[in-house]
């Protein structure tokens, strides 16, 4: 009826403490994905539970950070897929009330508050403006410092796609930052001796 538990494995404790060392970067990525503090905390918790449950599947000597990010992104994708299958319940009175709020400003999300504290305002606006696929790739490369191969594994896309997304994402960021206030401007070509027109 009752089983006697074996003493804790010191190797498992070492693995658990090594996994917990990645709490902050995983939380930052989860916050970027979910854009909600509570959902990010749940996502990180599920990631840690899965990592500890399947610790025997981790190959020692490989990149633990990339393995954890793969678990995090796969868990997030599963949640999105499950949410898409769910039934949508709409409160028509609430929708009508919300429609009457012309010009209302959306409240700051926890992600925006965190970014405001750590990033320049122009960079924040530029990051928020680029599509998620490019933002994730740039974030994992430039902030989390994962290799292209590791990012490909995390996102589940070919390495060429990762390289393309990072290049295009960086270009989008550059364009938004160089035109000022995160808005794109169209620069018309120069004709002999004439200045470029910026519209």
Image (tube, helix red, strand yellow):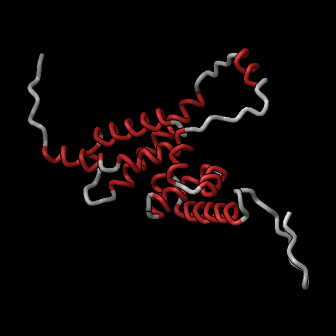
Q: Nearer the viewer, residue 64 or 139?
A: 139
In the image, residue 121 above or below residue 85: below
Extreme bottom residue here?
192
Residue 145, x across and y down, in percent? 44, 62
Residue 191 picture location, percent across and down: 90, 80
Depth check: 79 or 197 in front?
A: 197
Residue at x-position 11% and y-position 29%: 5
Label tally = 0
User: Which residue is drawn at the image coordinates 60% and 31% (left, top)?
Assistant: 84
Q: Judge from the rendering whether residue 157 lies leftward or rightward of residue 14; answer left or right.
A: right
Can you give x and y, in whole percent of width and height, for residue 44 in the image? Answer: 40, 40
Above or below, 129 against 150 in this view is above
Quadrant where the C terminus sits is bottom right
Q: Is residue 36 left or right of residue 19?
A: right
Q: Residue at x 58, y 24 (%)?
A: 86
Relative to residue 171, is residue 20 depicted above or below? Answer: above
Asked whether, in this view, residue 1 is left or right of residue 121, the answer is: left
> On the rendered structure, is 43 left or right of 53?
right
At 86% from the left edge and 70% from the top edge, which residue is drawn?
188
Classify residue 91 by image quadrant. Answer: top right
Q: Dividing the image into 4 quarters, which one contains the N terminus?
A: top left
Relative vertical location of residue 137 with respect to residue 113 in this rendering, above or below:
below
Horizontal and vertical percent position of residue 175: 70, 64
Q: Nearer the viewer, residue 150 or 105?
A: 105
Q: Name the one closer to the observer, 126 or 102.
A: 102
């Amino acid at each position: 009826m009752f089983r006697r538990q074996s003493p804790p494995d010191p190797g498992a404790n070492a693995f658990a403490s090594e996994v917990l060392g990645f709490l902050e970067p995983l939380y930052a990525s989860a916050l970027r994905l979910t854009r909600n503090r509570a959902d990010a905390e749940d996502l990180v918790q599920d990631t840690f539970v899965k990592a500890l449950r399947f610790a025997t599947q981790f190959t020692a000597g490989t990149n633990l950070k990339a393995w954890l990010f793969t678990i995090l992104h796969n868990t997030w994708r599963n949640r999105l897929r499950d949410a898409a299958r769910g039934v949508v319940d709409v409160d028509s009175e609430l929708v009508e009330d919300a429609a009457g709020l012309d010009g209302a400003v959306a409240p700051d999300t926890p992600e925006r508050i965190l970014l405001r504290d750590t990033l320049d305002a122009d960079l924040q606006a530029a990051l928020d403006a680029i599509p998620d696929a490019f933002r994730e790739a740039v974030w994992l490369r430039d902030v989390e410092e994962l290799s292209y191969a590791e990012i490909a594994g995390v996102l589940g896309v070919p390495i060429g796609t990762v390289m393309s997304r990072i290049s295009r994402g960086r270009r989008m960021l550059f364009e938004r930052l160089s035109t000022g206030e995160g808005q794109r401007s169209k620069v018309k070509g120069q004709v002999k001796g004439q200045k470029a027109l910026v519209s």
